[in-house]
Image: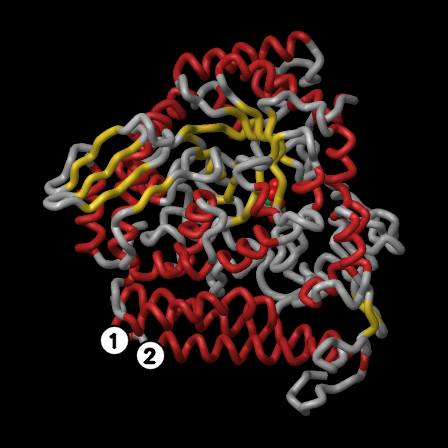
């Protein structure tokens, strides 16, 4: 990662720019190792790095750096557990980034690929340092302008691919399924129309003539007002397979996103339940997809909320390749203003049960051999806006390499690599980052409720912002109760899980309390395991969340003498904004429930009328 310590960054940069042996380090290819694997040994007068290929040498070199910084033994071996470790950018041709919080795109400007080779190369090295081996450079919401990446902008895509290649990173493109219509005025984009197939064949041939290791297409279809095969009376499998068959001879794949739901729902209609949608659409098509189709599934069944159960589809599909999609950019999780280390959340995602024996981690690298993260970088000086948000990109890469790492282990690598070896600095940053997710959850929407954010921006509180809207994201709070009954007696969402999980989530006494309001509709008087009413628990968490942020600020201030000024100011400025945000959430939500219930806080703290 780029660090704030310039001298460290520069030596790091020089060290890694060459694949020739540096003084004292001997690099050799050992074909007996896995292709992307490495082995490091400290010998008498030098360090030996063996790699299964050049890629293995790159990863070995970074591993050595990491181990030195974290104070680990140098002797080690490594190989990735997951084959495809992918970053998706939601960058638009005009240079904006959908849900980006760290400046503008490093790839696009004014409708074209317009970039600094040095910056893109820096970025490629940064991604290689955490083991990423694939990148999609454009937004899944592909405008008519973005569709031109397949045609007018293709020569520039090739140039970008050339920059990434030496770092063992392949390129893929997000495409608009309607491209034949958008780009060439064809009468239809029906996947079963022979002319449409011919059109795509031409595109694919052209791409591979320029980018022989092109990875494939990423497709958001039939989703959020974007066209797809269903609009032509076909199935998702028809659409994905048409493209997959064309890509297969070249070794390409199709990433087909499963983020499909009714985004024109009538809030009055409580028979539709948004989290059920992906499973209902894709399970009946399990086994119908070509082997080079990868269904890309968000971790939760809703949409990257602060806490959701895992999507049942991840465990349920049996005959179809799939990818786990995580969001590194902090859309619903504080927008790189509020502190939010995602490592702890992802550790829970991996630990979430699939059935009565296995957790998701057990499927990774086996049934699920692809992981995708939505990028959190932009052209900001420190890449991520908030320097501490770098930890999220780092954690994503490390977990993609080895899903058995814990969130804490990862931080113990990242903090010293970024801020040096001062123990006080390491311990205090570790503490605030490890607590950060739970703190954010406390002052926003704990217990799995989610949403209640300002419409569109998704930052700050608006308890009814999405309540009467078309997006299908309701909590249905009234004077007595809140939440949706998603049990087998309610919307039946829980039936999409393995029976052991259905039983757990259905039973109010067995359902994890942190997910209680995701699965159940409860009276405010419901008694929690700690003996408090649901309402009092809610009030308490909101007060605590603000107190946590105040404490974070004090902890951060105590580190001033030990941190580079830029880093110190960068985070302090954001912590102050976070405090404002936390207070707003606390007061708006406490008042919201107080107005419904008329029940004051048991501890007499201020709740506004
Ligand atoms: O979370 C929602 C975001 C959209 C995004 C969409 C998706 C790229 O609000 O901005 O669009 O998910 O994942 O497709």
Which residue shows up at 10% across the image and 45% down it?
45
Q: Mark 1 vs ligand 1: CB under 8 Å? A: no
* The C terminus: image quadrant: bottom right
Q: Secondary structure at mark 2?
A: helix
The answer to whether 247 is drawn above or below residue 497 in the figure is above
The picture places residue 58, in percent across and down from the top left corner, at 29, 37
**Is residue 541 at all visible to an observer of this figure?**
yes
**Does mark 2's beta carbon lie closer than 8 Å to ligand 1?**
no
- Quadrant of the image occupied by residue 462: bottom right
The residue positioned farthest toward the bottom in the image shown? 604
The tag on residue 558 is 2
For numbered disc 1, what is the local secondary structure?
helix
Kindly identify the residue that appears in the image at 41 percent across and 34 percent down: 133
Q: Quadrant of residue 179?
A: top right
Vertically, is 270 above or below 167? Answer: below
Decide if residue 72 is on the left or right side of residue 145: left
Q: Compute the Cα span from label 1 to label 2.
A: 8 Å
Label 1 sits on residue: 561
Q: Quadrant of residue 53?
A: top left
Residue at 35 percent across and 65 percent down: it is 570
């Amino acid at each position: 990662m780029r660090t704030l310590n310039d001298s460290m960054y520069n030596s790091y940069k020089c060290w890694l720019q060459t694949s020739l042996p540096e003084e004292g380090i001997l690099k050799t290819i050992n074909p007996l190792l896995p292709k992307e694997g490495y082995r490091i040994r400290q010998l008498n007068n030098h360090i030996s790095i063996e790699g299964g290929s050049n890629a293995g040498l790159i990863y070995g070199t970074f591993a050595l750096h990491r181990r030195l910084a974290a104070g680990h033994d140098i002797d080690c071996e490594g190989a990735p557990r997951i084959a495809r470790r992918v970053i998706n950018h939601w960058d638009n041709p005009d240079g904006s980034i959908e849900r980006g919080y760290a400046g503008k795109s490093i790839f696009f400007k004014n409708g074209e690929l317009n970039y600094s080779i040095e910056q893109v190369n820096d970025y490629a090295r940064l991604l290689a340092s955490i083991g990423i081996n694939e990148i999609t450079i454009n937004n899944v919401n592909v405008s008519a302008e973005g569709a031109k990446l397949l045609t007018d902008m293709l020569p520039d895509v090739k140039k970008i691919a050339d920059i990434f290649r030496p770092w063992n990173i392949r390129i893929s493109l997000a495409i608009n399924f309607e491209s034949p219509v958008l780009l060439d005025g064809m009468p239809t984009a029906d996947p079963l129309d022979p002319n449409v197939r011919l059109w795509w064949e031409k595109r694919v041939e052209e791409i591979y003539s320029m980018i022989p290791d092109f990875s494939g297409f990423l497709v958001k279809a039939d989703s959020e007002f974007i066209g797809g095969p269903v609009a032509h009376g076909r199935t998702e499998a028809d659409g994905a397979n048409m493209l997959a068959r064309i890509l297969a001879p070249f070794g390409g794949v199709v990433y087909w996103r499963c983020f499909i739901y009714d985004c024109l729902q009538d809030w009055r209609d409580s028979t539709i339940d948004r989290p059920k949608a992906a499973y209902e659409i894709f399970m009946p098509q399990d086994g119908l997809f070509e082997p080079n189709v990868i269904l890309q599934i968000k971790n939760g069944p809703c949409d990257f909320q602060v806490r959701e159960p895992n999507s049942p589809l991840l465990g349920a599909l049996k005959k179809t390749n799939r990818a786990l999609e995580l969001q590194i950019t902090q859309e619903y999780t504080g927008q790189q203003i509020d502190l939010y280390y995602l490592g702890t959340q992802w550790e829970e995602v991996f630990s979430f049960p699939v059935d009565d024996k296995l957790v998701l981690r057990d499927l990774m690298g086996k049934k699920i051999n692809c992981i995708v993260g939505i990028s959190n970088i932009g052209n900001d000086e420190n890449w991520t806006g908030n320097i501490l948000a770098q930890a999220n990109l780092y954690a994503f890469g490390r977990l993609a390499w080895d899903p058995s790492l814990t969130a804490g282990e990862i931080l113990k690598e990242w903090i010293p690599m970024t801020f040096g070896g001062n123990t006080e600095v390491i311990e205090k940053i570790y503490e605030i980052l490890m607590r950060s997710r739970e703190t954010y959850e406390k002052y926003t929407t704990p217990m799995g409720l989610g949403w209640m954010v300002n419409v569109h921006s998704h930052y700050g509180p608006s308890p009814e912002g999405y309540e009467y809207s078309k997006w299908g994201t309701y909590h249905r709070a009234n004077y007595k109760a809140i939440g949706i009954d998603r049990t087998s007696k309610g919307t039946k969402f829980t039936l999409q899980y393995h029976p052991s999980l259905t039983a757990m989530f259905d039973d109010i006494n067995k359902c994890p309390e942190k997910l209680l309001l995701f699965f159940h509709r409860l009276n405010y008087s419901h008694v929690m395991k700690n003996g408090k009413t649901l309402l009092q628990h809610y009030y308490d968490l909101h007060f605590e969340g603000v107190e946590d942020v105040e404490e974070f600020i004090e902890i951060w201030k105590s580190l001033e003498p030990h941190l580079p000024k830029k880093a110190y100011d960068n985070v302090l400025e954001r912590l102050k904004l976070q405090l404002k945000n936390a207070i707003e959430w606390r007061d708006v939500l406490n008042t919201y429930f107080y107005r419904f219930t008329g029940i004051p806080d048991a501890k007499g703290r201020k709740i506004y009328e």
